[in-house]
Image: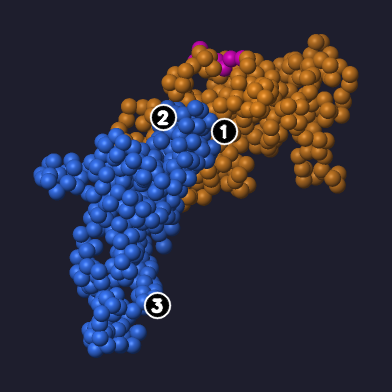
Amino acid sequence: MPEPILSIRNLSVGFRDTETKEVINVLRDVSIDVPADHILGIVGESGCGKSVTMHTVMGLLPRTAVVTAGQIRYDNRDLLGLNPVQMNEYRGKEIAMIFQEPMTSLNPVYRVGDQIAEMLELHQDISHKDALAEAVRKLELVSIPSPEKVAEQYPHELSGGMRQRVMIAIAMACDPKILIADEPTTALDVTIQAQILALMKALKEKMHSSIILITHDLGVVAEMADEVVVMYAGDVVEKALVVNLFREPSHPYTTGLLKSLPMLHSSDERLYNIVGTVPSPRNFPEACRFAPRCEFVHDRCLVERPRLVRIAPDHEVACWLRVAQGAA
Amino acid sequence: MGRYVARRVLKGVITLLITITLTFLIVRLLPSDPALMMLGEMFTADQRDALIQQFGLDKPLLQQYFIYLGNLFRGDLGMSFFQRRPVMTIIQEKLPWTLLLMVTTQILTMLVGIPLGVYSGYKRGTALDQVVNAVAIFGVSVFVPWLGFTLLYFFGFRLPIFPVGGAYNVATSGFARVLDIGEHMVLPVATLMVIFLANYVLYTRGSVIDVMEEDYIKTARSKGMTERRVLWKHASKNAMIPTVTMAGMMLGQMVGGAVLTETIYAYPGVGRMIYQAVGQQDYPVLQGAFIILALSVITMNIITDIGILYLDPRIKLE
C-alpha cells in the first residue's frame, strides 16, 4: 500500500453526558489510512461511528464530544492539535466534505453561485467578481446544465440531485486532496445516485484526489471503492481491498452484511438479517462489541477484546475466529 | 417583485377600507347623541335639528357612508367636538411626535436586540445568556404603566436627570431644541424599548438556537471559516426571518404601548390624544385616530413583508 496522505491513528472519541458529566466512549482505537488517489469506503450500520470518525477529521464534532486518544496525521501535522485558525487552512481547502442531505445542506438564503464563490474567497486571494466567474466554471465541472443561470438561483429552486452536484462543486472548488462524502446518495433516487457516484469518480480521476465514502450500501462500495473499512459500534472490525472483502469476508459482521444484500437469483424466500440492532454507546460490550449479535460467539469474545490482525496482504480483521489464521 | 408589492398594497387598501367601514359603523352604533356632545346641555330642538342637518346625520346611513368616504378621500376627518378644530389638523400636529418615538424605538431595538439575541443564542447556557434571558423575561412580563411610573419617579423626580413630561421646552431653539427633544425622548423610548427589546432578544435567540442545528451550518463550518463568520453570515440571516415576522405582528401592540407611554410622560403624540379623546367622548378624533393608526400599521406591515422578501428567497412571488 502506498504512503497514506491521511492517517487516523488509534482514535478514541466519547460523548459527555450533559447530566452526569460522564464520558461515554463511542470510537475505540480507530486506525484508518487513506492513500493518495484512492477511494476508501467506510461501511457499517447507522450508529457504528462512521460519521463520528469523519466529523473528527473535519473538526465538526459537537461540543459534547471528547477526543480521548489518538492522532490524525495529515501533511506531517496532527490535525487534533491544531487551533481553529490553523484548522481552517486545511478544512475546505485540503479536506472537503459533502453530506447526506442535499436538501438541507445548502444555505437557503444565499445564491448558489455565492455559496461556491465563498469557498474560493476563503482559501484563495481572489476578488468576489472573479470568484463568481470561477463558480460558474465549477458548476460546469459538475455537469450542471446552464451553469450561469443556476449560479443565480437559490437552493430551493433546484432538485435534490442538482443540489448534491452543487455541494460537490463547493467541496471540490479548491481542488482538495481528500473529499469526505458522508452517505452522499442515500437521500437520492436510484438513477440520480448512479449519476452522482459516476460524477464523483470522474472528478477523482481528473484531479487525483482521494475520496472517503461513508455508506451503508455495499453495492456502492463494490462499485466505487478500492479499499473498504467495516465499522461496528465504534470499532474497525475489518479492512480489506474491495475484491478481497467480497471474495473472503472474514468478520461475522461483514459476512452478515453481505448476506443481507438482496440477490436477484437468490433461492431463499426470506432475506437474511443480522439479529438485533447496534446497542446504544452506553451499552457497548467491553470485549468484542459484536458478540451479543454474533452467531459464532464463544467465551473468549465476552472477556477479551479482539484486535485487528493481518490474515492476508491487504486484509485485516478483528475477530477471535481468525486469530489462529493471523498468527500462522 | 413589482407584482408582489402591487398585490400586497392592494390587500392593504382592502384592509384599510374594512377598518374605515367598521369605524364608521361603531361610531354610529354608540348610544350618545352627537348634538348633545357638540352643543352641551343647553340647546333648543331647532338648534339640534339644524346641527343634525348641517352634519348630514338626517340622511340614510348608506348615503352618510359615501359622504364620509368622500370626505376621507379629501383628507377631511371631520371636526373635533371638544376642540372645535378639524381632526386632520390635530392629527397632523400629534402624529410626527408619535412617529419620532416609534421609529427611534424600533431602530434602537433592532440595533441592540438582534445582535444580543444572536449572541446569547450562540452562547446558550452560559452566564451571559442566562442574564440576558432573565432580563428579557422581565421585559416581556413587565406592566408598562408600572415601568413608566418607576422610571419617571427615579429619573425624573428623585434623580432629576430627564424631563418629566412633554416633547420639548419652548424656551429652546436651534440645536439646543434638537438636544432638548432628544432628552425628552429618553424615558418614553426607554420604557417602550424594554418591552420590544425583550421580544426581539427572545425571538432572535430562539431562532439562532434552532438555526445552529441546521445542516447548512455544518456545511459552512466544513468550508473552513471562522465561527464568527458562521454565526453572523450563515446563521443570522436565517435567524432574522422569524424575528422580522414577529416585528411586523407586534406593530399593533406598539399602538397600545404608545397610548400608555405617551400618557404617562405627557408626550404630545397620537397615543395621548386618544387617551384624552376617550375622556372627552370626542368621537371624531377617536375615529380619525383609529383610521390613521390603521393606515400606519398596514403600511408598516407592507414594509415588513417586503423586508422578509429580501431575507427569504423561498417566499413565492406569484
Q: Are marks 3 and 2 in contact (CB under 8 Å)?
A: no
The residue indicated by pointer 2 is B228
Residue furthest toward the right? A299
Q: Quadrant of the C terminus of chain A?
A: top right
Question: How far apart are the two marked residues, 3 and 2, measured between alpha carbons?
Answer: 62 Å
Secondary element under disc 3, as helix, strand or loop, is: loop
Q: Label 2 is found on which chain of the structure?
A: B
> Label 3 vs label 1: CA separation?
75 Å
- Name the chain letter of the residue that bears numbered label 3: B
Tell me the residue that label 1 is attached to.
Answer: A181
Q: Colour of chain B?
A: blue
**Tint applied to chain A in the drawing:** orange
Q: Residue B212 versus residue A286: which sits nearer the camera?
A: B212
Magenta range: A70-76
- Image location of residue A30, percent across then percent down: 66, 19
> Residue A48: within the magenta?
no
Q: Amino acid at mark 3?
A: Pro
Quadrant location of the N terminus of chain A? top right
Residue type beneath disc 1? Ala
* Image x and y of residue B171, in percent: 12, 46
From the viewer's side, name the closer residue of A124 and A288: A288
The amino acid sitting under disc 2 is: Arg
Nearer to us of marks 3 and 1 is 3
As helix, strand or loop, the secondary structure at mark 1 comes to strand
Left or right side of A110 for A277 = right
Check disc 2: other Cα within 10 Å, few if <14, some if 14-19, many if 20+: few
Please report contact status of discs 2 and 1: CB closer than 8 Å, yes or no. no
| Mark before the other along the chain sequence, 3 or 2 | 3
- In the rendered structure, does residue A71 fall within the stretch colored magenta? yes
The quarter of the picture where residue A61 lies is: top right
Name the residue located 82 percent from the left edge and 39 percent from the top edge: A272
Q: Which residue is mark 3?
A: B31
